[in-house]
Amino acid sequence: MEITAKTRMIRISPRKVRIVGDLIRKKNVNEAMGLLSYMPQKASVILKKLLDSAIANAKQKKYVDIDNLYVKNIMVDGGPVLKRFLPRAMGRATKVRKRTSHITLTLDES
């Protein structure tokens, strides 16, 4: 039985989250939590919270064994982009695109 957890509108670039997400894909839940605990990236804190949420969702279902869960899939999609401008030399301005992410985490029993 698949268990999912989603988070949306996270103020971090999807590219940065995908790097950390690829490391925990296909890993056991306990192993993934251990990896995320010691990573220095901002995305690891976000993914750890999301993994905690997915485990809490699994605990709500009585027939799921938490120790046999693994990260089946993690999808990181781009969200809306906040557009800002930065003043530059000679009266010009450049665009600054502040990207957001939508993250979906799926757990399954092995």
Image (cartoon, rainbow, N blue to C red):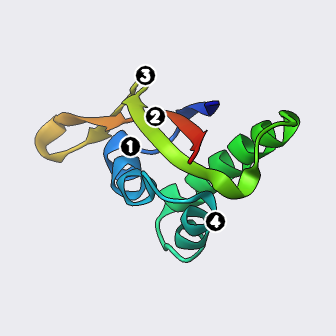
Horizontal placement of 77 versus 37: left or right? left
Foreground mark, 3 or 4, reads 4
Foreground mark, 3 or 2, reads 2
Q: Position of residue 12 (x, y in %)?
A: 45, 45
Which residue is outermost to the bottom? 38
Horizontal placement of 87 versus 101: left or right? left
Q: Which residue is mark 2?
A: 101
Q: Amino acid at mark 1?
A: Ser
The one nearer the camera, 61 or 24, is: 61
Q: Position of residue 64 (x, y in %)?
A: 76, 41
Horizontal placement of 36 versus 64: left or right? left
Residue at the image position 83 percent from the left and 33 percent from the top: 61
Q: Amino acid at mark 2?
A: Ser
Q: Amino acid at mark 3?
A: Pro
Q: Earlier in the sequence, mark 2 or mark 4?
A: 4
Q: Alpha-carbon distance for marks 3 and 1?
A: 11 Å
Q: Alpha-carbon distance for marks 2 and 4?
A: 25 Å
Q: Which residue is mark 1?
A: 13
Asked if the residues shown at circle 2 and circle 1 are in contact, with their CB atoms under 8 angstroms apart, the answer is: yes
Asked if the residues shown at circle 3 and circle 1 are in contact, with their CB atoms under 8 angstroms apart, the answer is: no
